[in-house]
Image (tube, rainbow, N blue to C red):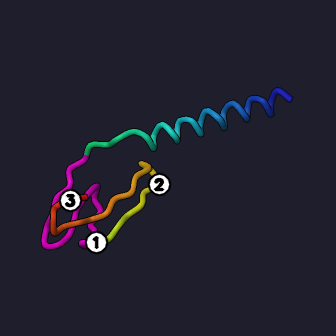
Amino acid sequence: MRTIVLFAVIALGGASQMIEDCNHRHQSEVSFEKGTCKYRNQTLKDGASLRLQFPCEEWVCNANTKDT
């Protein structure tokens, strides 16, 4: 019984850490070059999107207006 409780505590602690990581904003530079957006060593064409699991974020490249 103690083992089950310990596993539950560990699992819940890990879940809360993952939620916290998803809510944390990361500061990184975005650059725009020849109709693409470059961010965190990823290059997207204009209009393309990328969903990341860690860190928990999704972004869309809008190279024409230089916005992500």
* Rendering coords of residue 60 (x, y %): 31, 63
Report the magenta residues as a range: 28-47
In terms of secondary structure, where does tag 1 sit?
loop
* Mark 3 or 2, nearer chain start: 2
- Whether the magenta-drawn stretch holds residue 19 is answered as no
What is the quadrant of residue 41 in the picture? bottom left
For residue 56, the mark is: none
According to the picture, the residue beneath numbered tag 1 turns out to be 47
Label 1 crowding class (10 Å Cα cut-off): few <14, some 14-19, many 20+?
some
**Three-letter amino acid code at the position of disc 2:** Gln
Residue 46 in magenta stretch: yes
Quarter of the image that includes the N terminus: top right
Residue at the front extreme of this rendering: 65
Q: Position of residue 5 (x, y in %)?
A: 78, 29
Residue at 45% across, 40% down:
21
State the residue position of label 3. Answer: 67
First in residue order: circle 3 vs circle 1 = 1
Residue type at tag 1? Gly
Which of pointers 2 and 1 indicates the residue nearer the eye? 1
Residue, disc 2: 53
Please tell me which residue is depicted at 73% across the width and 34% down the height of the picture: 8
Badge 3 density bin: few <14, some 14–19, many ≥20, Cα 10 Å: few
Q: Quadrant of residue 3?
A: top right
Amino acid, disc 3: Asp
Q: CA distance from mark 3 to mark 1?
A: 10 Å
| Dot placed on the residue nearer the N-terminal end, 2 or 1 | 1
How many C-alpha atoms fall within 10 Å of the one at disc 2: few (<14), some, or many (≥20)? Answer: few
Q: Residue furthest right?
A: 1
